[in-house]
Image: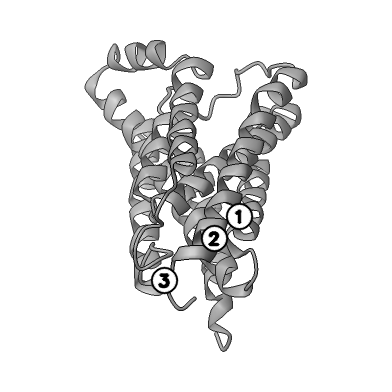
């Protein structure tokens, strides 16, 4: 492409389209150990996405060196990590999730691990990778917070694809809380100057047997709003303060 600033958007669009094709194909083809093969296919594709990301974007770093974090930013960053852990162990009933998964046979356990990792890797490198870094190249002022908001909104709306599996109301709730979680991951992506932590936390949140199940009953909208609106606000505040640190003390890469 002539405008290299748009390359990341182009790759993100192509990769998401390919993902949909692969996902639909793997889910409808009837083969032995279908769940294992489905998880393996998604996992392999996620690794290909990582390879293409570093082949085209060269690095997942935003800055030559990590931002110097003030005490306030360090506390907010720790809080965001704890919130991500809270989402899994409290909201997703993580302890029971882990017990249930470990009670299954070895193949089922490996398949579940691959499913969680593929979700974390693919979605992080697509949104906090290709899209986030592409938005950084388009904006000069307040680029961190703008890139965080836009990439998180896209991350949320990409979940509309799940409407075919879990119904519209549950999907719209997923769009809402995925956007909030996207803002959280974006702040951590900036604070840690990379994607490893967000991939790990994202994979943890998705470490569950019923990741794609249509049997989940949606929670009341009031509960979703009460829980995830503060998470979005705290994440935006953290990103705003990180933006201030960036403007004061850091020389960024040539974006």
Which residue was labeled with disc 1?
A: 151
Q: Is 62 positioned to the left or the right of 111 in the image?
A: right
Which label's residue is closer to the chain start, 2 or 3? 3
**Can you see residue 164?**
no
Say the numbered circle drawn on residue 117. none
Quarter of the rendering containing residue 26: top left
Q: In the rendered view, does 3 fall on the left or right side of 114?
A: right
Residue at label 3? Answer: 57
Residue 189, above or below 163: below
Question: Does 15 sit left or right of 120 as displayed?
Answer: right
x and y percentages locating residue 33 in the rendered image: 33, 30
Look at the numbered disc 1 and give the secondary structure of its residue.
helix
Total number of numbered labels?
3
Q: Which residue is mark 2?
A: 132
- Residue 144, how many percent across, how many down? 57, 60
Q: Is residue 220 visible?
A: yes
Give the camera-side residue of 234 and 124. Answer: 234
| Lower sequence index among marks 3 and 1 | 3
62 vs 82: above or below: below
């Amino acid at each position: 492409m002539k405008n290299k600033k748009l390359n990341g958007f182009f790759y993100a669009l192509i990769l998401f389209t390919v993902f949909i094709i692969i996902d639909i194909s793997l889910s409808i083809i009837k083969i032995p150990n279908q769940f294992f093969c489905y998880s393996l296919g998604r996992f392999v594709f996620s690794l290909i996405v990582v390879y293409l990301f570093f082949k085209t974007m060269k690095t997942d770093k935003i800055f030559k060196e990590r931002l110097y974090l003030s005490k306030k930013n360090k506390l907010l960053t720790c809080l965001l990590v704890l919130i991500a852990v809270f989402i899994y162990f409290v909201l997703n009933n993580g302890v029971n999730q882990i017990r249930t998964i470990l009670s299954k046979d070895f193949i089922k356990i490996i398949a579940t691990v691959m499913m969680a990792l593929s979700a974390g890797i693919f979605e992080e490198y697509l949104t906090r990778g290709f899209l986030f870094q592409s938005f950084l190249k388009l904006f000069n002022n307040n680029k961190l917070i703008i890139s965080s908001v836009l990439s998180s909104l896209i991350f949320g709306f990409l979940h509309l694809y799940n409407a075919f599996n879990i119904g519209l109301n549950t999907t719209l709730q997923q769009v809402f809380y995925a956007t909030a979680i996207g803002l959280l991951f974006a702040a951590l992506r900036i604070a840690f100057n990379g994607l490893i932590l967000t991939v790990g936390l994202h994979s943890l949140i998705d470490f569950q047997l019923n990741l794609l199940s249509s049997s989940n009953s949606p929670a009341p909208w009031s509960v979703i709003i009460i829980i995830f609106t503060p998470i979005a606000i705290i994440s935006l505040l953290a990103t705003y303060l990180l933006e201030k640190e960036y403007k004061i003390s850091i020389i960024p890469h040539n974006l």
